[in-house]
Amino acid sequence: MLRQLDNVKVRVAIAAVLVIGGVLTAVALNSGSGSDSWRAACGSAPAGPAGKQASVVAEARKALLNTGNDPRLGIEIVDLAACAVETSWKADQPQPAASVVKLLIALDLIDRSGVPSDSEATAVRAMVSASDDRVASRLWQQNGGAEIVRRQAAKLGLTHTEPPADPGKWGATRMSPTDVITVYRYITAGLSEEGREFLTEAMGSAPRTAVDGFDQHFGIPRAFPGAAWAVKQGWGSSESRRVLNTTGLVRTASRTYAVAVMASWRDTIDWPTATAAVTTAVGALKGSLRAAKA
């Protein structure tokens, strides 16, 4: 996903069938993600964690450390009802965002021309839901490239977000877990109702198979099978490292959370091992959230 401009891996006819079928499946499995059900009131900076989460973080880190290949991990989870940080680990350290930056591309488009409609709405939904790189590349070039990141960072107060060194490689934008959570807090508390419904509906219907054929139901979707979720996943290669990010909104029986788990390894790791490790890490975090609210 980070080599998008010169190596977009799309088989158009097959991808169309996979995406349409996947979207329908995701909608059926993840019902309740539409409407304005994701509205929250956590517009200001969340309070720090009330207690230490050392054991939870240790379990999440263990899942990655067991894979070898020099894993790096950043975590931030915020309880949106309490507007408080639930779990945090190296949350202020920027990492390659991969397709998570598509949220900034979509928000910038909404700022510039309003919530998209007609064919543009279809295209932007595909970019957010099925992670269509072609749409992201078009909007990136059309709306100023790195200036998109700079505008959104200034507007939202993203203090650990940097545009890519190579202006053409949008996926190499760097964001910290804290900044990703700030984006979700803006979507749930600051964005217009129409914009929020548009984006969360797209994220809530993310199909298992993305446009490029990648199984994007790692991390949050797989670790929270019984919960409503709205996600923006990211995967790819940057600076000789594999990047795997699972981010989004999760609603359990009693709480709504914004979650950002961002990981990378040396590029010697294989994708199945990496995705399994991230899912295991999120599962460890999920257990802590459930116990804390029991």
Image (spheres, rainbow, N blue to C red):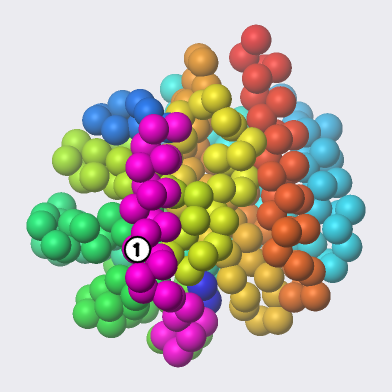
Q: Looking at the picture, tell me which residue is in the foreground, 63 or 82.
A: 63
Instruction: State the SS at label 1.
Output: helix
Q: Residue at x 62, y 45 (%)?
A: 219
Q: Amino acid at mark 1?
A: Ala
10 Å crowding of disc 1: few (<14), some (14-19), many (20+): some
User: Based on the displayed image, in which of its 4 quarters is residue 222 positioned?
Assistant: top right
Q: Is residue 174 visible?
A: no
Q: Residue at x 62, y 78 (%)?
A: 238
> Position of 183 compared to 243: left or right?
left
Q: Residue at x 39, y 32 (%)?
A: 28
Q: Which residues are magenta?
A: 3-29
What percent of the width, then of the height, locates residue 226? Answer: 55, 25
What percent of the width, then of the height, locates residue 91? Answer: 63, 50
Instruction: State yes or no: residue 11 in magenta.
Output: yes
Magenta: main secondary structure:
helix
Disc 1 marks which residue?
A: 16
Vertical order, 82 against 58 (above or below): above
Q: Looking at the picture, tell me which residue is in the foreground, 268 or 161.
A: 268
**Quadrant of the rendering where the C terminus is positioned:** top right
Q: Residue at x 73, y 43 (%)?
A: 281
> Position of 43 compared to 8: left or right?
left
Vertical order, 25 against 240 (above or below): above
> Position of 33 compared to 213: left or right?
left
